[in-house]
Amino acid sequence: MIAIYIIAVASLVAINGAILGSFMMLRRMSMMCDAIVHAVLPGLVIAYLFTASRGSFTMVMGAIASGVLATLLIEWVHAKFRVSADAAIGLTFTTLFSLGIILIAKFAGRVDLDQDCVLFGELAYVPLDLWITASGMNMGPRSLWSVSALTVTVVTFVGMGSRQLVSSTFDPDFARHQGVLVRLWHYLLMFMVSLFTIASFHAVGAVMVMGFFILPSATAYLLVRSVRALILLACLVGVLSVLLGFLFAQFNNVSIAGSIIFVNGIVFALAAWVYQARRPARIFENT
Amino acid sequence: MTLFSDPVFLVVLIGVVMVTVASSAVGCLLYVQRNALLGETMAHGCLPGIYAAFLLGGTRNLGWLALGATLSGLVSSLLVDAIVARTRIHHDAAMAIVLSWMFGTGVVLLSFIQQANLSNQNGLEDLFFGNAAAMSWNDVMIITGVSAVVGVLMGINFRRIKIYLFDAEYARMQGVKITWVRALLSSLVAMSVAIGIQTAGAILMASLLVAPAATARQWTSRLLPMVCVALAVGVLGGTIGTVLSCASPNMPTGPWVVISMTLLFALSIAAQRVSGRLKSSQKR
């Protein structure tokens, strides 16, 4: 049962990551994901200091606020000052992440978030954190509920907004012409990415969330050519990597989240090899 | 100032300053290439190399670990190039892929080391956020040495690198070997990241490369002056950050250095706004 809980939580994280990551990759904003997953930390800590409980609504809102704030800051620094986009990302998220770490170190006694949890997550402890209702009924692991709720949200979001998301991804001008509020969908996507990060944070750790974003979608991107197929295959790759990674971790007795990412990277390398083999020989060899 | 007469503090300060010297100079090269996040990728990419070096050598000698870090940083930069060249994945996605995979692999290796319960493994987790307080005189010597190598290599090849950065085609016509310069650039970044891991930590290393360069870029558009200003900003930020982090107990150094660098960036922008306004009012 413990193994099933862990695999279920990790698979749901992978599915959410694959769906959102596909859009982020198509929009060439993969490094923005990197910025957001680091930037949710200060919001999380500040909200925690106010409410003193984990998994509260305030905490989620704090983290989302700082994730979206990071996007706004990056865009502002890039637009307002003579700073290129990549440097703006590098400046902003490191500053926000430092702020979070300093706050954790400062209030170490009062914050039940240690640095290890931030980095590595607690996938192995997922089955231990059970949600017991007031009447004493065991509802299963807490994380399972939060990631399931997230999956419902993500699937609804992408299902409802697929037309707007796809058109604003590939041709923003056309989308604007069609009456799609491109800016709104951009920030909605950032909002979802922040939400995903905070919901998956306890399970896999802040930095490794990144791998769940990019690796499945990049693997699928090499093999298919339509958005629908990309998302479906990315989910499949994500879940497959979770299964193989879990086995790898059990076999070697190492970190589960790390193993999932390690295995997913190997799956990516295989996909790259297939891509190479399938690609017709280049006639115009450019230098 | 009692702090500055404390020998332990001085060791840490010299170490941090030497790290910032190397990273601010190299950061400028990445900045003008609009490739600032490569530093982030290589910093995460160093982790598996460090842990592999520890597993193979069984020692925590910084020189040995830095060698592993440099090699695996180079491998990650090669992987990014290979993904971009051989697949249809864009540069930023390629960096994200390599970054997250190397980090995941590093975590796997670290958990392996931890469960194998090897001797003298304490402090390996410090590499994520940096803990300059644990620096010894020996470490500082190694950091200074590597930093000097970075400086000398950059000084000798400065003209070549500059031509390549601004116009690769012209550089080729001038007889500069492009592959060689690219390899040199990657090695410079890898070396400066490798010595910085213990100070700033893998996660925040990117800032030490980007922030001084971004600050310097506000004041000049020529490469050599930019490097000089970045060096000044880096050394100042490193010093302020070290003082701040040593002033309060149990504080990791990296975050404070990053915050001070960002403050310097903000101050520099504010100063420039003010001076710009003064100039325009004088003209009137």
Image: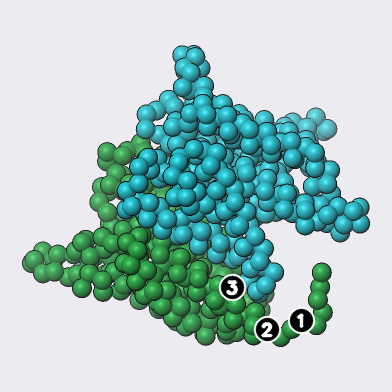
Chain colours: A green, B cyan
Q: Secondary structure at mark 1?
A: loop
Q: Which badge, 2 or 3, comes first in the chain's sequence?
A: 3
- Quadrant containing the C terminus of chain A is bottom right
Task: Say which quarter of the image contains residue B221.
Answer: top right
Q: Are marks 1 and 2 in contact (CB under 8 Å)?
A: yes
Q: Secondary structure at mark 2?
A: loop
Instruction: Identify whether B137 is placed above or below B188.
Output: above
Circle 2 Cα neighbour tier, 10 Å, few/some/many (<14 / 14–19 / ≥20): few
Q: The disc numbered 1 marks a residue on which chain?
A: A
Q: Which mark is residue A282?
A: 1
- Left or right: A230 as drawn, with respect to A79: left
Residue type of the residue flagged with mark 2: Arg
Q: Are marks 1 and 3 in contact (CB under 8 Å)?
A: no
Q: Position of residue A102 (x, y in %)?
A: 41, 39
Q: Residue furthest front?
A: B57
Q: Which residue is mark 2?
A: A279
- Given residues B40 and A276, the one toward you in this image is A276
Q: Nearer the viewer, mark 2 or mark 3?
A: 2
